[in-house]
C-alpha cells in the first residue's frame, strides 16, 4: 500500500510517510493510498529498514579519491552482513517497476558527516568486509546496481543525526526487493550499538 503522512516529507506535492501510525485515516499521520489512475502509478513508502551496529565506538574512515570509505553495517563479520531491505509492491503482475524518489537516513550519533547510500535491486548484496572495513559489494553487477545517493547528516534536535534527499528519480524494475548499503564518506565516531533507520519513497508505474 501507499501512504500519506509525514508533514516533513513530500513527493511531487503529496504528503507521505511510513505506516507506523495508528492515527485515524485521513489525518496527518494515517496511511492513505494515493494513486493516479490515468498513469497507473502510485506513491508508496515501504516499511522502514533498520539495523543495530556493533557494540563499539571504532571511528569510521571516510572515502578518498581512490579508496571507498568504511562499510556501516550490523556486523564486523562479512558473512553476517544484512543489507537494509525494502519490499516494493506491483500495481499488477509480479514485476515491480517505478522510481525511487526519496531516501531518508536516521542515525544514533549526533554528528555532522556524509554517508553514501548504495541502492541495489533484485539480488541481495554481499560484501567483502564487515562493519568498519572498506565498503565493497562482492556480487556487484550492472543489472542490479541502481546507483548511489550522497547524504549530508546533521545533528537533530530530537537526538542523533538525520539526512535525506527528496529530489531523486532512480528507475527500478524487479520481481524481488530493493536494498541499501551504507558507506562512510567522511570520518565520524559512531554510537556503540546504535540504531540506523532508512526510508525509501517509491513512485510505482507497474
Image: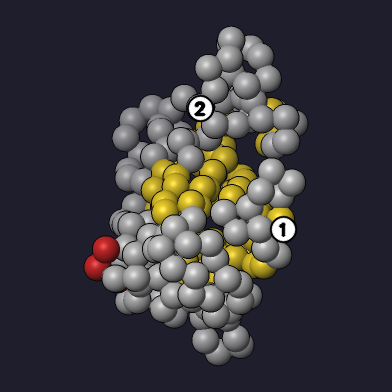
Provide residue 27's location: percent of width, then percent of height. Answer: 66, 14
At 44% from the left and 58% from the top, the residue drawn is: 193
> Picture quarter containing residue 154?
bottom right
Q: Is residue 103 above or below residue 5?
A: below
Looking at the image, tell me whether mark 2 or mark 1 is earlier in sequence order.
2
Q: Is residue 135 above or below residue 196?
A: below
> Picture quarter containing residue 35?
top right
Provide residue 76's location: percent of width, then percent of height. Answer: 34, 70
- Graded by Cα atoms within 10 Å as few (under 14), some (14 to 19) or many (20 or more), the crowding at tag 2 reads few
Query: Where is mark 2, residue-wise?
Result: 20
Asked whether the viewer can see residue 192, the reply is: yes
Query: Where is mark 1, residue-wise?
Result: 154
Q: Quadrant of the C terminus?
A: top left
The answer to whether the residues at label 2 and label 1 have Cβ atoms under 8 Å apart is: no
Comparing 165 with 39, the one in front is 165
Q: At numbered mark 2, what does the secondary structure look like: helix, strand or loop?
A: loop
> Picture quarter containing residue 124?
bottom left
Provide residue 187's location: percent of width, then percent of height. Answer: 61, 76
Comparing 56 with 89, the one in front is 56
Q: At numbered mark 1, what does the secondary structure look like: helix, strand or loop?
A: strand
At 47% from the left and 24% from the top, the residue drawn is: 1
Amino acid at each position: 500500500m501507499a501512504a500519506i503522512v509525514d508533514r516533513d516529507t513530500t513527493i511531487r506535492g503529496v504528503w507521505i510517510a511510513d505506516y507506523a501510525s495508528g492515527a485515524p485515516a485521513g489525518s496527518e499521520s494515517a496511511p492513505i493510498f494515493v494513486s493516479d489512475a490515468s498513469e497507473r502509478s502510485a506513491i508508496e513508502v515501504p516499511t522502514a529498514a533498520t539495523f543495530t551496529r556493533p557494540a563499539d565506538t571504532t571511528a569510521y574512515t571516510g572515502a578518498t579519491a581512490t579508496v571507498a570509505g568504511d562499510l556501516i553495517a550490523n556486523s564486523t563479520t562479512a558473512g553476517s552482513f544484512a543489507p537494509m531491505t525494502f519490499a516494493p509492491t506491483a500495481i499488477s503482475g509480479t514485476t515491480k517497476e517505478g522510481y525511487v524518489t526519496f531516501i531518508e537516513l536516521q542515525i544514533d550519533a549526533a554528528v555532522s558527516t556524509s554517508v553514501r547510500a548504495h541502492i541495489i535491486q533484485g539480488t541481495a548484496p554481499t560484501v567483502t568486509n564487515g562493519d568498519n572495513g572498506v565498503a565493497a559489494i562482492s556480487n556487484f553487477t550492472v543489472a542490479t546496481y541502481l546507483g548511489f545517493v550522497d547524504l549530508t547528516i546533521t545533528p537533530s534536535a530530537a537526538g542523533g543525526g538525520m539526512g535525506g534527499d527528496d529530489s531523486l528519480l532512480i528507475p527500478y524494475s524487479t520481481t524481488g526487493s530493493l536494498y541499501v548499503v551504507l558507506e562512510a564518506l567522511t570520518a565520524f565516531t559512531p554510537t556503540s550499538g546504535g540504531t540506523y533507520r532508512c526510508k525509501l519513497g517509491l513512485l510505482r508505474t507497474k
